Amino acid sequence: MMPKIQLASGMHIDARSANSQVKMLTALQRLHAEGIAFESLKIGKFCQYAGVSRATFYRHHQDLQDILAVELLKQIGAFEHRVDQRTIMDFQNGSALIVSALLDARRLWQLIVWAHAEDRARSLMIGAVQRVLITRDYPSADRTFISEWLGTALLTFALQTAQVEPAMPPAKALSLYRTLIPDLPPIVN
């Protein structure tokens, strides 16, 4: 029997950085709720609004979309940790866990659409899928194709369900997920 490989890498963020991230994410959420166009945001004004210095911002981010990328990485890490806690992971359990995580991050997906950060999110989702495929020993040629397809499909599913008003009921989202996104295929050599 193959030993279980842990997905979660244990990304640790120091308390000050985490506090700054929360302030910046909260500021983005407020600006989005106020209907401010993302394109109109300037770093200096944003930092004042968020209550962080420009130096703090640039120490951790190259632009405002990076705030969302960091948050998505945190969400992916939390999801991987939940997967690692499971003793049995089949399509039924896995799909329920995935849909729950995607629905829980609804506000983040809405911010990603608002900030036009879909391409960054896609890269992060593809990377997350690739890590899963590596732990399942998929051949590298298949990993690339499957991770790009599945990462893009997961992102599309997340973005579309996040835009549904009122929020889609979890049971309906799970049913749609299981219809639209199949289980990973068995390894074929």
Image (cartoon, rainbow, N blue to C red):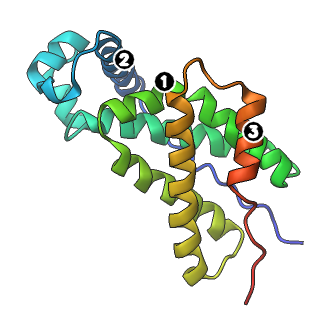
> Is there CB contact under 8 Å for labels 1 and 2?
yes
Q: Which mark is residue 88?
A: none
- Residue 78, by quadrant, is top right
Q: Nearer the viewer, residue 31 or 124?
A: 31
User: Is 130 situated above or below 111?
Assistant: below
Is residue 119 visible to the viewer in this orientation of the structure?
A: yes
Secondary-structure class at tag 3:
helix
Query: Residue 182 location in percent, x, y?
Result: 73, 59
Q: Inspect the image, locate mark 1, and give the three-letter code of the amino acid beneath it.
A: Arg
Q: Residue furthest bottom?
A: 189
Query: Residue 5 location in percent, x, y?
Result: 72, 61
User: Is 17 situated above or below 23?
Assistant: below
User: Is 125 situated above or below 44?
Assistant: below
| Residue ID at (17%, 34%) | 58
Q: Inspect the image, locate mark 3, and give the three-letter code of the amino acid beneath it.
A: Leu
Secondary-structure class at tag 2:
helix
> Is there CB contact under 8 Å for labels 3 and 2?
no
Q: Identify the residue position indicated by label 3 in the image.
A: 174
